[in-house]
Image (spheres, rainbow, N blue to C red):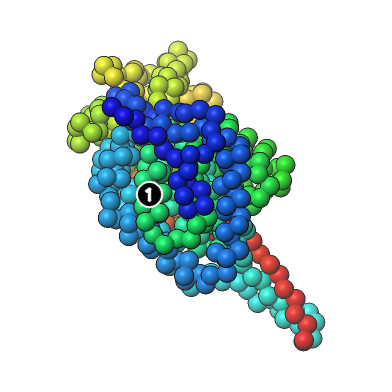
C-alpha cells in the first residue's frame, strides 16, 4: 500500500518543503500507518510566516464583510464533505463516528458564526477632557497569527483559531498536531478549492519541538494561539517572551463536579458519565473529579459505577455503536494506567475498571470509578485525560467548594442541585472560567471559553474570543 505524504501549504501552493525527515501517522485503534508528514525545518516555517506577512496588509484592507465571505465558502465546502472528513478524524484520532460528525458540522457552523461578526466588530468613542477633541478606539488586526493545534478536537480547533483571525483581518500559519494531521490536510485541500487569496492561510507540519518552536520564535508572528498541555504552553510563553509576542493559551483542566444531596442523581450520573467517556476521556473541559454529599454517596457511586461499567469501547470504524474508542497513543494509555495504579497503592478503592483492556490491538483503558481518595492525592490534583473518575465524599456545599477550588487548574466546573441558592453560590464562589449547572460540560460558540490559573491565558468563542485577535489603536483628534 502506498503511504500518502502530505505537503506543506504555503502562499497558496502545496509544496515539497524543506524538511529534516518524515513522521508517520498511525491509527490508534489498529496501529496501521495512515500517512506521513514532513518534519518541517525552521526555514520552511519561516517561508510560511513570510507568506502570511506579505499577504496581511491587502487582506486587512478588504472590508470585513468580504473577508467573511471567504469563511462562508470554506464552511460550504466542509458541509459537502462531512462523511469523508468524519471518517478521516475517526481513523487518525480514535473518536466515535457520531462525535466526529458533530465535530465536522460544528466546525462549519463555527466558521459561519464568526463570519456573522463582520458587521459587528466595534470600537469606541471616548469622552475627552479637551474642548473640540474627539477620542476614538479602533480595533485592528494584529498581523500574523500562529495557530498550534491539539489532537483531541483537531478539526474544530482549525476553525476556532482561523475563523476569528481571518474575519478581523489577520493572516495565519497553522501547525496541526503530528498525531492528527490528515484532517488538516483535507481542510487545506477544501480551502484551496475556494477563491481565498494566496498567503492568507498557510499550514506547516511537524513536531512542536522543531516546527512549533520555529513558529513561536519568529518575530513576524504577532499572536500565538495554542491549545494543549500546561507544559507545552509554558514553553510557548517562554519562546514568545523573546519577541514580546501575545499569547492565547487554552491548557489543561481538572474540572470538579459537585453533586449535592438534593440533586437529580440520575441526571448527574448520566452527565458525568458522558463527560468522562466522551473522546475516551481526552477532553480538557470535562469532569475529572466528583465531590458528592455523604448522605447520597452510596446511591450515587452505585449508579455511577453501573453506568460507567456498561460503557462499551473498541475500534470505532469497525463498530459504530461503541461509546468510546482508543486513546491517542500508547504513551497516553500508560500515563492513565500509572496514575490509577499509584492511586490504588495509595489506598483508593477501584469500584469498577482500573486496568488496561487487551483487545489484541489499540490503546484502550476500561471505564474506571475510584472512591476513598484524598483531596491532596495525585489522582485528585493531576489531569488524568482518560476514562477515569475519582469520587470524594464531602459533608456539605462548604467543603465541596473548598475542595473544588483547591487546584492548580481553573477551566471548567459543574454543580448538580435543585436549590437555586446553592447554584448561584457556586457561580459566585467557584473560581473557574466556566460553571455548568445540571448539565454536561460542553461550551457554546457564542460564549467565552476561558480558564484561570494554569488552565490558560485569554479565551475563545463569542465576542470576547473574537477580540482576542485584535489590538486597539487610540486616536486623539483635535479639531
Residue 81: percent from left, percent from top? 28, 51
Q: Is residue 277 left or right of residue 9?
A: left
> Which residue is drawn at the image coordinates 45% and 66% (left, top)?
68
Q: Nearer the viewer, residue 220 or 354?
A: 220
Q: Can you see residue 73?
A: yes
Q: Is 161 rendered above or below residue 313?
A: below
Residue 399: percent from left, percent from top? 50, 36
Q: Can you see residue 150?
A: no
Q: Nearer the viewer, residue 154 or 364?
A: 154
> Which residue is drawn at the image coordinates 44% and 40% (left, top)?
7
Residue neighbourhood size for the residue with mark 1, other residues' Cα within 10 Å, grouped as few (<14), some (14–19), many (≥20): some
Q: Nearer the viewer, residue 407 or 426?
A: 407
Q: Quadrant of residue 351?
A: top left
Q: Nearer the viewer, residue 402 or 14?
A: 14
Residue 228: percent from left, percent from top? 51, 38
For disc 1, the marked residue is 189
> Which residue is drawn at the image coordinates 53% and 70% (left, top)?
62
Q: Is 289 rendered above or below residue 132?
A: above
Amino acid at each position: 500500500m502506498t503511504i500518502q505524504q502530505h505537503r506543506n501549504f504555503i502562499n497558496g501552493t502545496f509544496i515539497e518543503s524543506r524538511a529534516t525527515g518524515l513522521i508517520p501517522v498511525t491509527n490508534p485503534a489498529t496501529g496501521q500507518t495512515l500517512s506521513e508528514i514532513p518534519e518541517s525545518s525552521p526555514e520552511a516555517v519561516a517561508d510560511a510566516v513570510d507568506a502570511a506577512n506579505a499577504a496581511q496588509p491587502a487582506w486587512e484592507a478588504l472590508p470585513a464583510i468580504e473577508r467573511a465571505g471567504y469563511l462562508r465558502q470554506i464552511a460550504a465546502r466542509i458541509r459537502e464533505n462531512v462523511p469523508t472528513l468524519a471518517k478521516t478524524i475517526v481513523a487518525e484520532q480514535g473518536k466515535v463516528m457520531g462525535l466526529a460528525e458533530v465535530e465536522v458540522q460544528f466546525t462549519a457552523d463555527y466558521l459561519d458564526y464568526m463570519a456573522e461578526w463582520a458587521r459587528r466588530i466595534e470600537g469606541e468613542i471616548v469622552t475627552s477632557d479637551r474642548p473640540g477633541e474627539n477620542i476614538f478606539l479602533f480595533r485592528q488586526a494584529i498581523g500574523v497569527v500562529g495557530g498550534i493545534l491539539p489532537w483531541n478536537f483537531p478539526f474544530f480547533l482549525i476553525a476556532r483559531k482561523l475563523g476569528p483571525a481571518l474575519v478581523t483581518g489577520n493572516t495565519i500559519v497553522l501547525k496541526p498536531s503530528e498525531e492528527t494531521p490528515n484532517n488538516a490536510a483535507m481542510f487545506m485541500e477544501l480551502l484551496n478549492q475556494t477563491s481565498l487569496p494566496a498567503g492568507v492561510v498557510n499550514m506547516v507540519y511537524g513536531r512542536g519541538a522543531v516546527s512549533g518552536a520555529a513558529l513561536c520564535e519568529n518575530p513576524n508572528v504577532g499572536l500565538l494561539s495554542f491549545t494543549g498541555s500546561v507544559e507545552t504552553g509554558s514553553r510557548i510563553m517562554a519562546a514568545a517572551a523573546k519577541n514580546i509576542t501575545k499569547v492565547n493559551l487554552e491548557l489543561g483542566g481538572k474540572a470538579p463536579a459537585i453533586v449535592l444531596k438534593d440533586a437529580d442523581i440520575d441526571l448527574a450520573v448520566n452527565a458525568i458519565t458522558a463527560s468522562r467517556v466522551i473522546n475516551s476521556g481526552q477532553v480538557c473541559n470535562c469532569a475529572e473529579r466528583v465531590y458528592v454529599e455523604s448522605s447520597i454517596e452510596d446511591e450515587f457511586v452505585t449508579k455511577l459505577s453501573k453506568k460507567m461499567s456498561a460503557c462499551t469501547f473498541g475500534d470505532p470504524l469497525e463498530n459504530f455503536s461503541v461509546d468510546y474508542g482508543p486513546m491517542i497513543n500508547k504513551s497516553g494509555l500508560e500515563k492513565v494506567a500509572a496514575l490509577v495504579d499509584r492511586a490504588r497503592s495509595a489506598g483508593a478503592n477501584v469500584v469498577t475498571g482500573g486496568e488496561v483492556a487487551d483487545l489484541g490491538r489499540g490503546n484502550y483503558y476500561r471505564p474506571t470509578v475510584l472512591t476513598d481518595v484524598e483531596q491532596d492525592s495525585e489522582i485528585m490534583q493531576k489531569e488524568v485525560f482518560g476514562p477515569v473518575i475519582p469520587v470524594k465524599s464531602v459533608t456539605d456545599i462548604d467543603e465541596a467548594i473548598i475542595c473544588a477550588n483547591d487546584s492548580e487548574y481553573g477551566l471548567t466546573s459543574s454543580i448538580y442541585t435543585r436549590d437555586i441558592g446553592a447554584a448561584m453560590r457556586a457561580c459566585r464562589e467557584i473560581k473557574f472560567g466556566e460553571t455548568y449547572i445540571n448539565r454536561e460540560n460542553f461550551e457554546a460558540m457564542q460564549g467565552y471559553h476561558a480558564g484561570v490559573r494554569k488552565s490558560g491565558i485569554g479565551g475563545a468563542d463569542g465576542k470576547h474570543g473574537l477580540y482576542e485577535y485584535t489590538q486597539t489603536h487610540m486616536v486623539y483628534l483635535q479639531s
